[in-house]
Image: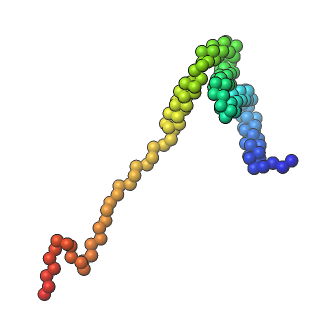
Amino acid sequence: MNLNQQQTRYAGIALIVLGVVAVLNLWGLVPVALLAGGGYAIYRRQSALGRQNEAVQALLWGVGLALLTLLGVVWPGVLLLGGASLLLRGREAQAEQRVARVVGQIGRRRTPAAPPAPARTEVTIVSDDQPASNQTVRLR
C-alpha cells in the first residue's frame, strides 16, 4: 500500500482527533461531527455537480440533525427540520446567498484590523556647495 502525502496527512489528523476524543472522553460528539461533516461533504459534492437545490437541502439536514443530536431533541426537532425543509423548497438559491453573506460577515469580524500606515516624512538634502535657485551668488 503506497500512501501519498495527502492521505498520510489525513490519517495523521484522524489519529490526533481520535486521541483527543479518547483523552477528553468526548465520544458523544462523534455522531454530531459525522452528521455535520457528512452534510457539508454532500453539499460540496452536489454544488460541484451544479445541483444547488439538493446541496442546500443536504446541508440543512446534515447540520440540522447534528444540532438536534447535540441538543438532545431529535424527535420533535425532526418535525421542525422537515417543516423548514419544505418551506425552503424553491428558495434554496436565496437561502444560500444569505448564509454566504452572514458567514462572510462573521469571517470579516474575526480578521484583525490592518495596522495603521506609518507617517511619511520627506527629507530634502541640501548641499552647502550649491545655492538655492532664488539665492544670489556673490563673488569676491
In this rendering, is residue 133 above or below 37?
A: below
Residue 27's image quarter?
A: top right
- Left or right of 102: which side holds 37? right
In the image, residue 43 sits, relative to residue 139, either above or below, namely above
| 30 sits left or right of 101 in the view | right
Residue 1 visible in rendering: yes
Residue 91: percent from the left, percent from the top?
57, 20
Residue sitting at x 70%, y 13%: 75
- Observer-nearest of 41 and 114: 41
From where the camera sits, is residue 44 visible? no
Q: Residue at x 66, y 12 (%)?
A: 79
Q: Which residue is farthest bottom?
A: 140
How many numbered callouts? 0
Q: Residue at x 14, y 85 (%)?
A: 139
Q: Name above or below for residue 128 compared with residue 42.
A: below
Residue 35 placement (x, y as % from top left): 71, 27
Front residue (pair 2, 11): 2
Q: Quadrant of the C terminus?
A: bottom left
